[in-house]
């Protein structure tokens, strides 16, 4: 039964007090925009008044999630810093809300997941994906970095070295690569099985709270950064490989991931916001975004 139907999201009541948050944008493309933000918050409020035992996150579109809205991006970074900061904090609020729900959250990734789509998955406790999907953080190609917790949650899940490779390269990876580093917990070969297996896992987690609570603890814990020597070696490699407009974003991402590793979740997210603002307002990013729009 559908209990909430928005422009971007449906909330469906499943059996035994389990719910499904289904991204189903009327435009046909799931994007992390203001309307999606508003509807996730509405869903969280609705869930707080139920006896929910678990939440399944899915998509009705072939692409699970295409990332951010480029038009909103352009509008955002001409605003004063304080207003941009407020918007970034608002965007993080629903993901933090998802990650703090008093029951397990399982994400079923049925198609490509980029940028903000991966950050939504990171806010879940368990992630299943079709074995042929593509996944990654392409933000550095626009001269920016992930802005809704990617530089904070990914290192805590897969380690700093893997997070650096994924975020600083800007590459799009195969599902098997995501499984290898622990970003995806299970790969499913049959599209017809994906949601069924995800719901089975959700029910399993619901009766074994220690399992998903340990994941939550890990996501909030500090993680070991690279040594100073390793960091300098990595930065030197970036400078040799990526001369051009994207270099500053790659260097900023490296420095931020290192800093975030040793900070609390709250302070690390705040640090991420400020770096996003600096990069989003940079001439490099403006040129790259304009080139993207015109392509």
Image (cartoon, rainbow, N blue to C red):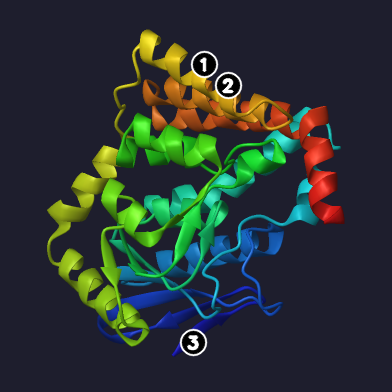
For residue 177, side relative to residue 5 (left or right): left
**Mark nearer the viewer, 2 or 1:** 2
* Residue 85 drawn at (x, y percent): 69, 34
Quadrant location of the C terminus in the rendered image: bottom right
For residue 109, side relative to residue 80 (left or right): left
At 85% from the left and 46% from the top, the residue drawn is 290
The answer to whether mark 2 and mark 1 are in CB contact below 8 A is: yes
Of the residues under marks 1 and 3, which one precedes in the sequence? 3
Q: Which residue is farthest front?
A: 240
Instruction: State how far apart marks 2 and 3 are (Cα).
Output: 53 Å
Q: Is residue 10 above or below residue 102?
A: below
Q: In this view, does 145 lie above or below 224?
A: below
Disc 3 element: strand
Q: In this view, does 5 lie above or below 85?
A: below
Q: How many marks?
A: 3
Which numbered tag is attached to residue 240? 2
Q: Is residue 227 above or below residue 147?
A: above
**Mark nearer the viewer, 2 or 3:** 2
Characterize the local packing of mark 1: few (<14), some (14-19) or many (20 or more) Cα atoms within 10 angstroms.
few
The answer to whether mark 2 and mark 3 are in CB contact below 8 A is: no
Circle 1 sits on which residue? 236
């Amino acid at each position: 039964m559908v209990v909430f139907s928005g422009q971007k999201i449906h909330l469906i009541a499943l059996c035994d007090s389990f719910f499904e948050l289904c991204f189903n944008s009327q435009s046909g493309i799931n994007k992390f925009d203001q309307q999606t933000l508003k509807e996730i918050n509405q869903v969280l409020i609705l869930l707080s008044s139920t006896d929910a035992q678990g939440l399944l996150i899915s998509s009705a579109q072939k692409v699970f999630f295409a990332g951010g809205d480029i038009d909103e991006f352009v509008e955002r970074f001409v605003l004063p810093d304080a207003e941009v900061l407020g918007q970034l904090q608002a965007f993080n609020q629903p993901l933090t809300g998802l990650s703090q729900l008093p029951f397990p959250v399982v994400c079923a990734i049925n198609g490509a997941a980029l940028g903000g789509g991966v950050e939504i998955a990171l806010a879940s406790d368990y992630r299943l994906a079709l074995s042929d999907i593509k996944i990654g953080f392409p933000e550095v190609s626009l001269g920016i970095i992930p802005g809704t917790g990617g530089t904070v949650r990914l290192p805590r899940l897969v380690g700093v070295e893997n997070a650096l490779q994924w975020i600083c390269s800007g590459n799009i990876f195969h599902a098997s690569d995501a499984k290898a580093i622990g970003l995806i917990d299970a790969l499913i070969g049959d599209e017809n099985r994906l949601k069924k297996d995800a719901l089975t896992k959700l029910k399993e987690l619901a009766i074994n709270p220690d399992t998903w609570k340990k994941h939550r603890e890990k996501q909030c814990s500090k993680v070991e950064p690279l040594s100073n020597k390793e960091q300098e070696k990595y930065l030197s490699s970036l400078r040799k490989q990526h001369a051009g407009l994207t270099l500053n974003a790659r260097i900023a991402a490296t420095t931020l991931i290192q800093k975030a590793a040793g900070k609390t979740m709250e302070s690390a997210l705040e640090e991420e916001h400020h770096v996003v603002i600096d990069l989003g307002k940079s001439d490099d990013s403006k040129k790259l975004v304009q080139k993207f729009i015109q392509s």
